[in-house]
Image: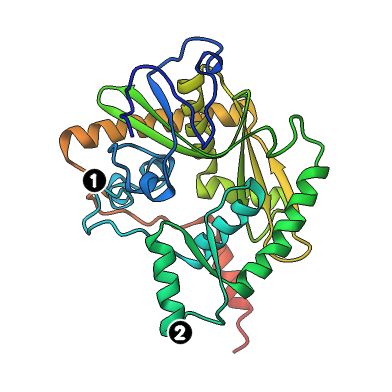
């Protein structure tokens, strides 16, 4: 498989690319593009930082981040499989053209035969889906493909590129990073990332985006592509609703938003390096937090509220 600091850069996704065309300028750090399975990526044989753990370092605490890392968590790492994750995999398969799902003709996984088929699929590194769930995802996927083809983006969404690309890079100081990109365009100038969301309404989705730390993911992935190819790509978030009419919206970060996100990634890298070196993964500050009276609970407001009590 090769380590993250192997000399040179290799691109592979079942197809080999000309190494001379990989970078338009010298990479800033040593990096490598690897062809690995989803299971290998999440198991993390490189002992690396990814965007999920980086988000936890910033939005939660190092203690939370530690429990999200397969090599550091208290319990032995076991791959997680949820309905949402499996359906997301199927949606990616439909849009991105990969092949990771087994469609099983059972009503449920309650029978022994269905469970055996499901377990065999998992053991082969694939994603088992019941037929009726696959049929529902087909409707969503067909709508998604139609909308993507009609969306006036330059370059067009999810074309002329490679799906599920894993980049490993060395930040120096003993820090290795990894990222798995939904879709990397051939010229390395654009990354497309698909998000299934209850609401893709632009204002509502952008409000949720900050809470979920997607801007950190964007800055992290941009950093990885720049490390591997010497280019600073545009990161496009494609949000789609899972219910009819399967509405879709597309988002990018403004320069100010991206700068703030890059600052968060820088901080996450510092925290990660410090925690690895010291072995200390602190949670919340060990102090008593004083609860202040919020403005809406000021005495005059409280009097107005009590005046309305009907007894």
Q: How many marks?
A: 2
Q: Is residue 86 above or below residue 175?
A: below
Q: Which of the two discs, 2 and 1, labels the residue nearer the N terminus?
A: 2
Could you tell me how far apart the alpha carbons at marks 2 and 1 are, in whole angstroms? 42 Å
Specify the farthest residue to the left: 278
**The one of 20 and 95 positioned closer to us in this rendering:** 20
Judging by the rendered image, the residue that carries numbered circle 2 is 110
Q: Callout 2: few (<14), some (14-19), or many (20+) C-alpha neighbours within 10 Å?
A: few
Is residue 298 visible in the rendered structure shown here?
A: no
Please give the name of the residue rendered at 55% of the width and 80% of the height, measured from the top-left corner: 106
Q: Is residue 303 left or right of residue 123?
A: right
Question: In the structure shown, which secondary structural element does the residue marked by tag 1 occupy?
Answer: loop
Q: Position of residue 108 (x, y in %)?
A: 52, 81
Please give the name of the residue rendered at 52% of the width and 55% of the height, measured from the top-left corner: 100
Q: Is residue 159 above or below residue 8?
A: below
Judging by the rendered image, the residue that carries numbered circle 1 is 282
Is residue 224 visible in the rendered structure shown here?
A: yes
**The one of 289 and 192 positioned closer to us in this rendering:** 192
Q: Is residue 253 left or right of residue 228?
A: right
**The one of 132 and 29 positioned closer to us in this rendering:** 132
Q: Is residue 261 left or right of residue 198?
A: left
Q: Which mark is residue 197?
A: none
Q: Position of residue 180 (x, y in %)?
A: 47, 40
Q: Position of residue 308 (x, y in %)?
A: 64, 78
Q: Callout 1: few (<14), some (14-19), or many (20+) C-alpha neighbours within 10 Å?
A: some
**Coloring scheme of the render?**
rainbow
Q: Position of residue 128 (x, y in %)?
A: 50, 66
Question: In the structure shown, which secondary structural element does the residue marked by tag 2 occupy?
Answer: loop
Q: Is residue 151 above or below residue 220?
A: below
Q: Is residue 2 left or right of residue 76?
A: right
């Amino acid at each position: 498989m090769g380590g993250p600091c192997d000399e040179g850069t290799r691109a592979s996704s079942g197809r080999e690319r000309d190494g001379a065309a990989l970078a338009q300028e010298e990479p800033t750090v040593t990096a490598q593009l690897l062809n690995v399975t989803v299971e290998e990526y999440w198991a993390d044989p490189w002992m690396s930082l990814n965007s999920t753990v980086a988000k936890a370092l910033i939005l939660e605490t190092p203690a939370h981040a530690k429990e999200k890392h397969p090599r550091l968590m208290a319990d032995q790492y076991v791959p997680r499989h949820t309905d949402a994750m499996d359906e997301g995999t199927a949606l990616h398969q439909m849009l991105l053209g990969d092949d990771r799902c087994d469609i099983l003709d059972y009503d449920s996984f309650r029978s022994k035969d269905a469970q055996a088929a499901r377990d065999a699929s998992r053991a082969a590194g694939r994603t088992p889906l019941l037929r009726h769930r696959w049929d529902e995802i087909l409707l969503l996927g067909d709508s998604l493909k139609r909308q993507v083809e009609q969306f006036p983006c330059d370059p067009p969404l999810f074309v002329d590129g490679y799906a599920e690309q894993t980049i490993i890079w060395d930040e120096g100081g003993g820090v290795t990073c990894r990222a798995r990109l939904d879709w990397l365009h051939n010229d390395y100038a654009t990354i497309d990332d698909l998000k299934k969301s209850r609401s893709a309404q632009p204002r509502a989705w952008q409000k949720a985006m900050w809470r979920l730390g997607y801007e950190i993911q964007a800055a992290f992935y941009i950093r990885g592509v720049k490390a591997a190819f010497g280019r600073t790509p545009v990161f496009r978030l494609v949000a789609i609703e899972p219910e009819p009419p399967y509405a879709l919206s597309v988002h990018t970060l403004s320069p100010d938003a991206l700068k703030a996100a890059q600052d968060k990634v820088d901080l996450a890298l510092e925290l990660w390096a410090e925690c690895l070196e010291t072995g200390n993964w602190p949670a919340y500050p060990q102090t008593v937090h004083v609860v202040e009276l919020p403005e809406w609970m000021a005495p005059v407001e409280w009097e107005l509220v009590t005046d309305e009590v009907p007894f």
